[in-house]
Amino acid sequence: MKILFYIPQADAAAWLHDFARALPEAELREWQPGDTAPADFAVVWRPPREMLAGRDTLRAIFNLGAGVDAMLALEHEQLGTLPRNAQLIRLEDTGMAPQMAEYVTHAVLRYLRRFDEYQMLQNERRWEVLDPHPRETFTVGVLGLGVLGAQVAQALAAFGMPVRGYSRSARQIDGIVTFAGEAQFDAFLDGVKVLVNLLPHTPDTGDVLNARTFSKLARGAYLINVARGGHLVEADLLDALASGQLAAATLDVFREEPLPADHPFWQAPRITITPHMSALTLREESVEQVARKINALTRGDTVSGVVNLERGY
Ligand code: NAP
Ligand code: GLV
């Protein structure tokens, strides 16, 4: 079995080393420009088009992340880039869900207990106790109830604030009030105090964090975007912060990454920025999951995590 890699990170050698241990019978090679030799599987993160185009022998492409939007963009820009017979398979959790639950819980609790405002008071050497936000109306709405969103919603519910979730198809999760499909979108948003985005970036979800969406939330709501920058209409966020419809935002993802030094978000006092680190791909867990699925496919079994190309996730 031949496996081709494209892992543009400083530690590519460590990934190959771990895969060689997990799949000792496999022939592994790192893709180099000009390499068109056959391979059965590819393991990639944001590969160049030339690596994949025309690779008719590939059985599956493993994406070393949960989101496959960059892979599907390659196909969208040039039809036929993704080999027709290869399944596209994304990572499922592999240690990202606990990281995401920590990140989002931290951000929500920071707003619930007004630590962001206490930091501003400290900067002005002001000793002042603020009225607490009532927990029972501090409703958190989680967009996306998949592998990550469902665990985030459950982690938040453990703190006792009301939690709602929104997905494409109907879902039932203990302790979460769930909504599904476009017809229930406004009911999901109505009065939400913290909106958390964990949707995949697809043609249906791009720009979903816009002025209309913000207008349905409680006045002075908070936004936490940990999915993709393409979900957010940036000018609408700045307007909503200026008008007070939104009180603050925590953003981990951006339309352009790294966020350019002259971007207005850096200067916005109520925007907290992190560099796309809310849930990092963990090598050990990812190698274990991908190797297990390669073995399953080689035996002729089916695996989970296969992307539906029509749906876009
Ligand atoms: P997932 O398991 O595929 O879950 C996606 C969820 O979104 C599902 O509940 C799905 O509904 C829902 N959804 C998709 N399209 C929808 C639509 N048009 N309307 C309503 N709901 C829709 O994905 P995941 O593993 O949880 O990951 C989610 C995203 O997080 C990834 O795509 C990636 O962009 C982002 N992410 C970011 C980081 C980071 O470090 N910032 C790390 C990892 C992932 P159904 O349940 O009905 O299918
Ligand atoms: C990271 O953003 C991922 O999609 O895994």
Image (cartoon, grey):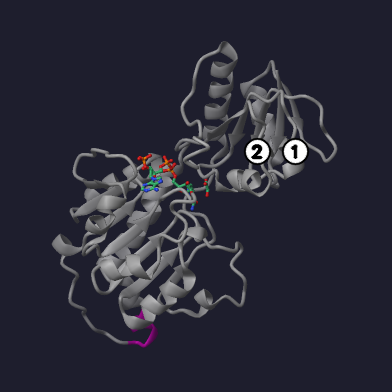
How dense is the environment of label 1, judged by Cα within 10 Å: few (below 14), some, or many (20 and up)? many
Q: Residue 43 is drawn in which quadrant?
A: top right
- Neighbour tally class for label 2: few under 14, some 14-19, many 20 plus, Cα within 10 Å: many
Residue assigned mark 2: 44
Viewer can see residue 142: yes
Residue position for label 1: 51
Percent from the top left, x then y, of residue 201?
Answer: 49, 51
Find residue 44 and report its horizontal and vertical position in percent.
Answer: 65, 38
For the N terminus, give its image quadrant.
top right
- For label 2, the SS is strand
Q: Residue at x 49, y 23 (%)?
A: 303
Q: Which residues are magenta?
A: 120-125
Is any atom of residue 156 visible in this view?
no
Find residue 191 and report its image quarter: bottom left
Look at the picture and state if 182 lies above or below 261: above
Q: Is residue 228 magenta?
A: no
> Residue 196's image quarter?
bottom left
Amino acid marked by disc 2: Val
Name the residue rendered at 60%, 15% in the picture. 298
Look at the image and say whether residue 121 sits in the magenta stretch. Answer: yes
8 or 168, which is in the foreground?
Answer: 168
Mark 2 and mark 1 in contact? Answer it, CB < 8 Å: yes
Magenta: main secondary structure equals helix
Along the polypeptide, which appears first: circle 2 or circle 1? 2
Q: Is residue 127 left or right of residue 300?
A: left
Q: Give SS at disc 1.
A: helix
